[in-house]
């Protein structure tokens, strides 16, 4: 039975792949994997004016990057003959008809209905007439405006959803035989590609009764529906630009890992079963892709909206980056070193091994490598940053000089953090009344050019001695 599971996602190439569509794709993909089903990618590009092939590329690249490979691919613009055949069938059977009302007239009608707070619907008198001039009309489905029937479907996530048939009006199906409209093309494609489960965003709920009417008119099987909850921003309004990055590409560019996006997006509205046993002492909410494909069930998707919490995403991403094995870390960080630090930087593999954890303990995303530029090149900073509390510039210079002398006397081949710490602590005690900041702050700034960094002694432990002395000299010169 399970090999009959076929699901699809159907993005329009009118913009880059949005996080919401990516989450829908992921839930479809997980459902297909869990059930040995087929995952279909369908590009809904019948709106030629708004569709752009560069967005089709973005959608494919983003799905690729996330690892959501599709088993079958369709493009609506290549299927116009198929829709035409079904449109003609409905016209021949007198289930559909030509409506000749002008766009202006229809717009006025729906504006007035909205003003009266009614659901916009068009009840067309042309359905009782023989068509005359087909060039100026659109094709509609005959829907009984006096119907007392309630259309209902059983949503896997939301339970029974009901709709009064009489509120729908004569549904538009196509602008003409070669230009199907959204709901019609969706129904035909879902049928032709044998989609068993339609898993999509909650914003499609109102399309469902319309699509059911079309399915009934065509005499085709109605798929199972599952409508996923909305995704809200942290302020509980619908996720939008105001909340930050919206497209998968932007997260890719900032240095979020694809496995993190999968882990994080799965938890946008889905909860692991309560009895799930965590392996290997991993924190709660950390799941690998293969774990998810084993435990994902649509019944564990919530009805209420999910909240996109960027702090949580950052935490998960930081956790994964820190856990990356050395070789994998080097592979993923390399392009970010190029981009954020500079093209001419050459980084030795052993050096990256040494500084890796100093950075990953403090990284949320790979582009944060820019906060550690001092590991790769001389820092740039204003001399004012060297100041510590109300200590004079002369005293700062004295501190830097004493630190330099202390470090010069040390053999870097026998680097001992505790020994150096003791030396610097003694310096603070003897020369600066025990004010450790007077010693460590100017040192930190000389080495990093930054206010925040790992412990200066940890930085000393990875930088070559000549580099340390050179940076101290530069600071003294300031
Ligand atoms: Zn009409």
Image: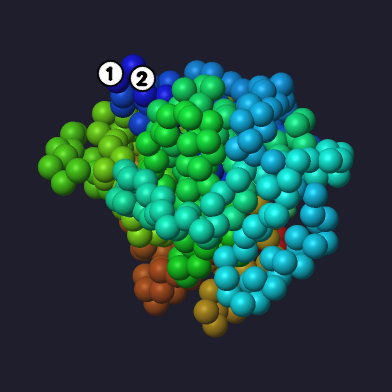
Say the numbered circle drawn on residue 4.
Answer: 2
Judging from the image, what secondary structure is the residue with disc 1 in? loop
Nearer the observer, 467 or 338: 338
* Tag 1 near tag 2, CB within 8 Å: yes
How busy is the neighbourhood of tag 2: few (under 14 within 10 Å), some, or many (20 plus)?
A: some
The N terminus, quarter of image = top left
Nearer the observer, 87 or 42: 87
Above/below status of 51 relative to 456: above
Q: Residue at x 48, y 48 (%)?
A: 209
The C terminus, quarter of image = bottom right
Q: Residue 277 occupies which quadrant of the picture?
A: top left
How busy is the neighbourhood of tag 1: few (under 14 within 10 Å), some, or many (20 plus)?
A: few
* Location of residue 439 in the rendering, given as x and y in whole percent from the top left corner: 47, 65
Q: Residue at x 59, y 55 (%)?
A: 169
Disc 1 under 8 Å from ligand 1? The reply is no
* Location of residue 207 in the rendering, given as x and y in whole percent from the top left corner: 53, 49
Which residue, given by chain and number where applicable, does mark 1 sit on?
A: 1
């Amino acid at each position: 039975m399970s090999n009959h599971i076929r699901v699809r996602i159907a993005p329009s190439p009118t913009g880059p792949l949005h996080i919401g569509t990516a989450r829908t794709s992921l839930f479809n993909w997980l459902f297909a994997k869990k059930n040995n089903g087929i995952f279909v990618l369908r590009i809904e590009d019948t709106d030629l004016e708004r569709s752009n092939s560069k967005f089709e590329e973005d959608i494919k690249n983003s799905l690729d990057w996330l690892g959501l490979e599709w088993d079958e691919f369709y493009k609506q613009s290549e299927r116009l003959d198929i829709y035409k055949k079904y449109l003609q069938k409905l016209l021949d059977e007198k289930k559909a008809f030509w409506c000749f009302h002008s766009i202006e007239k229809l717009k006025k009608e729906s504006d007035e209905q909205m003003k009266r707070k009614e659901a916009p619907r068009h009840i067309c008198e042309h359905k009782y007439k023989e068509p005359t001039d087909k060039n100026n009309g659109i094709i509609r489905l005959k829907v009984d405006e006096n119907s007392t029937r309630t259309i209902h479907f059983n949503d896997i996530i939301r339970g029974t959803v009901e709709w009064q048939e009489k509120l729908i009006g004569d549904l538009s199906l196509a602008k003409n035989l070669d230009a199907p409209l959204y709901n019609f093309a969706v129904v035909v494609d879902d049928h032709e590609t044998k989609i068993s489960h339609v898993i999509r965003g909650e914003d499609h709920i109102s399309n469902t009764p319309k699509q059911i009417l079309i399915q009934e008119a065509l005499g085709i099987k109605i798929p199972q529906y599952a409508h996923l909850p909305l995704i809200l921003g942290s302020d509980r309004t619908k996720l939008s630009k105001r909340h930050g990055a919206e497209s998968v590409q932007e997260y890719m560019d900032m240095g979020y890992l694809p496995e993190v996006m999968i882990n994080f997006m799965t938890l946008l509205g889905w909860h692991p079963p309560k009895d799930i046993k965590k392996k290997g002492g991993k924190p709660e909410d950390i799941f690998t892709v293969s774990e998810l494909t084993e435990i994902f069930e649509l019944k564990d998707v919530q009805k209420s909206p999910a909240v996109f919490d960027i702090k949580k995403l950052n935490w998960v991403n930081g956790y994964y980056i820190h856990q990356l094995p050395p070789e994998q870390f080097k592979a993923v960080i390399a392009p970010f070193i190029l981009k954020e630090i500079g093209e001419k930087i050459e980084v030795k593999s052993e050096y990256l091994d040494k500084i890796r954890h100093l950075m990953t303990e403090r990284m949320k995303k790979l582009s944060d490598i820019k906060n550690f530029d001092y590991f790769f090149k001389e820092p740039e900073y204003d001399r004012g940053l060297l100041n510590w509390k109300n200590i004079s510039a002369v005293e700062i210079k004295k501190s830097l000089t004493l630190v330099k002398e202390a470090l010069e006397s040390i053999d870097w081949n026998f680097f001992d953090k505790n020994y150096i710490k003791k030396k610097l602590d003694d310096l603070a005690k003897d020369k600066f009344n025990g004010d450790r900041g007077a010693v460590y702050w100017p040192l930190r700034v000389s080495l990093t050019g930054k206010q925040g960094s790992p412990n200066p002694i940890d930085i000393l432990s990875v930088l070559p001695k000549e580099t340390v002395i050179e940076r101290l000299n530069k600071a003294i010169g300031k």
